Amino acid sequence: MAVVAVAPVAIVEQLVAALGPLPRGIGNALTGKVERVLERHEDGDDAAACRALTALGNQLRALGGKKVPDTAAVRASLERIGAFMGCGA
């Protein structure tokens, strides 16, 4: 059995997609935050990638129960990704 490593940034994209269909403006805003995480991570700017990941989590927290039904599981996963990336260390 082969083990496939998945980059943390790929997981972030999958988690946002897991929220399901979103209103266009919200989807665009979340996608923009994911893109910032990816760009910062790929540039090797870990501190900026962590700040972008935090901004994504904060926006999800603000949207939870309002425009997006439940974001708790996704936010918890983002926190684990942040720990994996070394955020808050």
Image: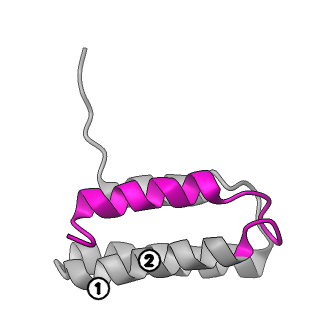
In the displayed structure, does residue 23 sit left or right of residue 38? Answer: right
Query: For the magenta stretch, what is the residue range?
Result: 63-89
**Tag 2: residue type?**
Thr
State yes or no: residue 67 in magenta: yes
Mark 2 or mark 1: name the one nearer the start of the chain. Answer: 1
Residue at image point 74% right, 82% down: 25
**Tag 1: residue type?**
Ala
Q: Residue furthest left?
A: 44
Residue at image point 23% right, 21% down: 2
Quadrant (top left/top right/bottom left/bottom right) for the C terminus: bottom left
Q: Position of residue 83 (x, y in %)?
A: 29, 60
Element carrying mark 1: helix
In the displayed structure, does residue 80 sit left or right of residue 18? Answer: left
**Which image quadrant is residue 24 in?**
bottom right
Separation of marks 2 and 1 at Cα, in angstroms: 10 Å
Q: Residues within 10 Å of mark 1 (few under 14, many from 20)?
A: some
Instruction: Check disc 2 and report the residue beneath it.
Output: 54
Instruction: Check disc 1 and report the residue beneath it.
Output: 48
